[in-house]
Image (spheres, helix red, strand yellow):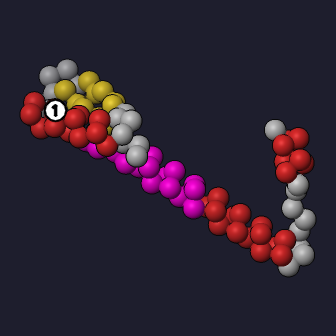
Amino acid sequence: MLYLLTIIFKEIMESITIKPRNDSEMQFVMEFIKRTKLRSSLDQSNKAIKKQEVLDGITSSVEQINQHMKGEIELKTLEEFLDEL
């Protein structure tokens, strides 16, 4: 999971972005914020964007497979694909 956590310090109007690598780190950070009573906001918009990108990629791949099965397009071989890289 990707979380972006922004902590805003009232007195100096600065913000810090924290990117926990896993749920355990996220829980630790959230507990710290609760105990210190810092004002914070949680932004999960990047997560939603990435999820949509994955879904779009899967949809596109399924459409290509269907077109290939109907004989409408020819798919690349693994060798052709690797040559492009």
Q: Position of residue 15 (x, y in %)?
A: 28, 27
- Quarter of the image for residue 22 reads top left
Residue at horizontal 12%, vertical 38%?
Answer: 34
Residue at horizontal 22%, vertical 25%?
Answer: 13
In-image side of 10 versus 57 (left or right): left
Rendered position, 28 above or below 81: above
Residue at horizontal 89%, vertical 47%?
Answer: 79
Is 41 included in the stretch rendered in magenta?
yes
In-image side of 58 versus 78 (left or right): left
- Quarter of the image for residue 26 reads top left
Q: Quadrant of the C terminus?
A: top right
Rendered position, 79 above or below 25: below
Report which residue position mark 1 lands on.
32
In-image side of 27 versus 66 (left or right): left
Which stretch appears magenta?
40-55
Which amino acid, mark 1?
Phe
